[in-house]
Each structure stands twice: as C-alpha cells, then as structure tokens.
C-alpha cells in the first residue's frame, strides 16, 4: 500500500485460513445473521403487539433484543463483505465508529440487565409497592438512560481515538474493538484512565448491582413460601443465563487484547466468531423458551402458521 493509503485505511488481518472457504463462510454467516434478526425481532414484535406483555420486564427484554440486532448489524454486514473481498480493509474513521457502536451497545446491555434485576427485586421482594415504583414513565426513563448514557460516554473516547496518529495499520482482528489501541504510535495516559473509568461505570458497577440484587432475591425467596420461590426461579433464571453469557463474552473481549500474541490465529478466529454468534442468537432462544408468557404467544404464532 502506498503512504496515503496507509494513512487512511487499516487492514483487518484476522481472516487467517478463512479465504480458502470464503464462500462457505459467507453463506453460513449470512444465514446466521438472518436468523439473529428474525429471532430477535419476532419476540420484539410479539411484545409490541400483545397488551399483556406491556409490562416492565418484557419492555426491558425487548430493549435487550433490539440491542442484539444493533450489535449484529454493526459487525455482520462488514464481515460478510470481507469474506468475499480480496482485501479486508476499513477506514480509520469507520473502524473507530464500529468500535464506538460495539462498546456503546455492550455498556447498554449491562445497564439494561441492571434495570431488569431491579425490576425483579421490586416485583418479588416488594410486590405491594411494585405498581407505584415501576411505572411506565420510570421504565421508559431506565431504557432511555441505558441507551444514551453509554453512547454519550463512549463518544468522548471515539473522538479522542480518531485524532490519534497510527503507526501500525494491520489489525489482527475480524472487526474493530479495543485492539485499535495497539495501532497507535503513542499510548495516551488520558485515554487509558478514561477507559478504566468506562469499564468501572458501564460494566463493573452494573454487574455488582445485578449480583447484589439477585443475592437479595435469593435470600428473601428462600425465607418465603414455595410460590414465591417458583416465581423467582421462573423470572430470574433467564436473566441470570443472559448475564453469565454476556459477562463471559466481555471477559474474553478484554483478555484477548492482552493475550493476542500468545493465541494461535486460527483459535482466535474461532473464538471471535463464537463470541459474535452465541450471545445475539441465544438471547431470543433463552427468553422465548424460558419466559412463560412469551412462549405462549410464540407457540400460538407457530400453530397459526401451520394450520
């Protein structure tokens, strides 16, 4: 590449060995992307259409599933183009934008999970106060804040990253994330500190809040009658499964940057593809099968289709 080209574009060098099976990879990933969109939006539409699903818990679920669609749409279209392209390149500005969307959605996910845990806590531990505390206005504020707060905080990092000069133009990844820091000529102390601040505010604190609320729910449910324990298990288990899935995904994303050079390239590709596949695909399956009311509407929908 010439010097001007290097100043503008980054080569995504994570497609090792995939070029041999690029059309097969394209077809598989395209089918998976379509499934992710269909599965998530089907449940979102069911929640939108049916009045008995217009409750805080289901509104938060709909917001989470919309997040899954945004997450996948941020990665899959570019990934599909790269599978069939001779050169896997991306402009620096678009790379920064992709990373911005990626981490904004991730931060939003943790805040929504925190809001859902609070909703379950109030529902199970303070049932008489639930209608007063979890009003529609309160739920809307929670959802709007969960979507806007991470974006507002991440945009500062994105603007600063876009202005930093790059000395390396080969990113050993399938898409842009925090690995972009390794391309910079000089590591910014301010950006590093701000990154720790973001990690603390958008990930660690919400995660600790979720764990605290579910421990409280567990303690109170254990002391209560059987019906309360059953309700807690039915409504909290899907959220915990999603939390475990997403936390594992985040841990991998953080650790992989530190260990990138020690992980074989093929293993790195396989793990990355699993990361971008499992979470957005598992979310609608978990909520569709484990949430009783959603499952009823899904079952009725498919029965109507077959009749």
Image: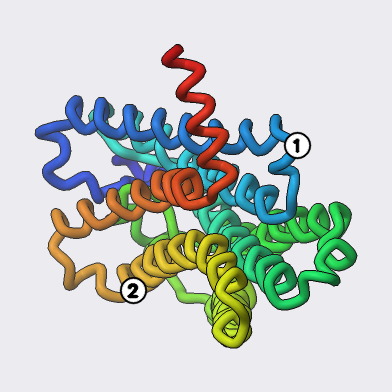
Can you identify the residue that label 1 sits on?
Answer: 51
Q: Which residue is mark 2?
A: 255
Display colour scheme: rainbow
Q: Nearer the viewer, residue 101 or 222?
A: 222
Position of residue 75 in the picture relative to residue 21 (left or right):
right
Q: Position of 98 compared to 170: left or right?
A: right
- Point out the tag, 1 or 2, that comes first from the N-terminus: 1
Which structural element holds mark 1?
helix
Residue occupying image coordinates x 77% and y 60%: 142
Mark 2 is surrounded, within 10 Å at the Cα level, by few (under 14), some (14 to 19) or many (20 or more) other residues, namely: few
Which quadrant is the N terminus positioned in?
A: top left
Q: Is residue 208 left or right of residue 270?
A: right
Q: Position of residue 284 (x, y in %)?
A: 47, 44
**Placement of 296 over or under 132, stated as above or below:** above
210 relative to 119 in the view: left or right = left
- Relative vertical location of residue 59 with respect to residue 150 in this rendering, above or below: above
Answer yes or no: is residue 163 visible: no
- Figure quadrant of residue 251: bottom left
Q: Is residue 222 above or below residue 294?
A: below
Q: Nearer the viewer, residue 18 or 245?
A: 245
Residue drawn at 77 percent across, 75 percent down: 126
Which residue is located at x 41 percent, y 28 percent? 34
Say which quadrant the C terminus sits in: top left
Which residue is located at x 52 percent, y 25 percent? 301
């Amino acid at each position: 590449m010439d010097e001007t080209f290097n100043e503008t574009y980054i080569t995504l060098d994570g497609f090792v060995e995939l070029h041999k099976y690029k059309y097969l990879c394209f077809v598989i990933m395209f089918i998976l992307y379509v499934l992710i969109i269909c599965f998530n939006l089907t449940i979102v539409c069911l929640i939108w259409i049916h009045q008995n699903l217009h409750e805080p818990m289901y509104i938060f679920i709909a917001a989470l599933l919309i997040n899954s669609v945004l997450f996948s749409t941020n990665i899959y279209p570019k990934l599909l183009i790269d599978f069939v392209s001779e050169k896997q390149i991306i402009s620096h500005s678009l790379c920064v934008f992709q990373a911005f969307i990626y981490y904004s959605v991730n931060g939003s996910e943790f805040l929504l999970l925190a809001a859902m845990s609070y909703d379950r806590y109030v529902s199970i531990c303070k049932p008489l106060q639930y209608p007063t505390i979890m009003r529609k206005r309160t739920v809307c504020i929670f959802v709007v804040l969960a979507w806007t707060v991470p974006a507002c905080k991440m945009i500062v990092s994105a603007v600063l990253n876009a202005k930093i000069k790059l000395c390396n133009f080969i990113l050993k990844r399938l898409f842009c994330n925090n690995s972009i820091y390794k391309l910079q000529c000089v590591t910014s102390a301010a950006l590093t500190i701000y990154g720790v601040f973001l990690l603390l505010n958008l990930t660690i604190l919400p995660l600790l809040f979720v764990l605290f609320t579910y421990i409280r729910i567990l303690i109170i449910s254990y002391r209560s009658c059987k019906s309360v324990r059953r309700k807690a298990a039915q409504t909290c288990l899907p959220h915990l499964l999603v939390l475990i899935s997403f936390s594992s995904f985040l841990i991998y994303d953080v650790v992989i940057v530190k260990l990138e050079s020690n992980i074989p390239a093929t293993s790195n590709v396989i793990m990355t593809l699993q990361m971008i596949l499992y979470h957005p695909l598992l979310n609608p399956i978990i909520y569709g099968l484990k949430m009783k009311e959603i499952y009823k509407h899904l079952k009725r929908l498919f029965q109507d289709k077959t009749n």
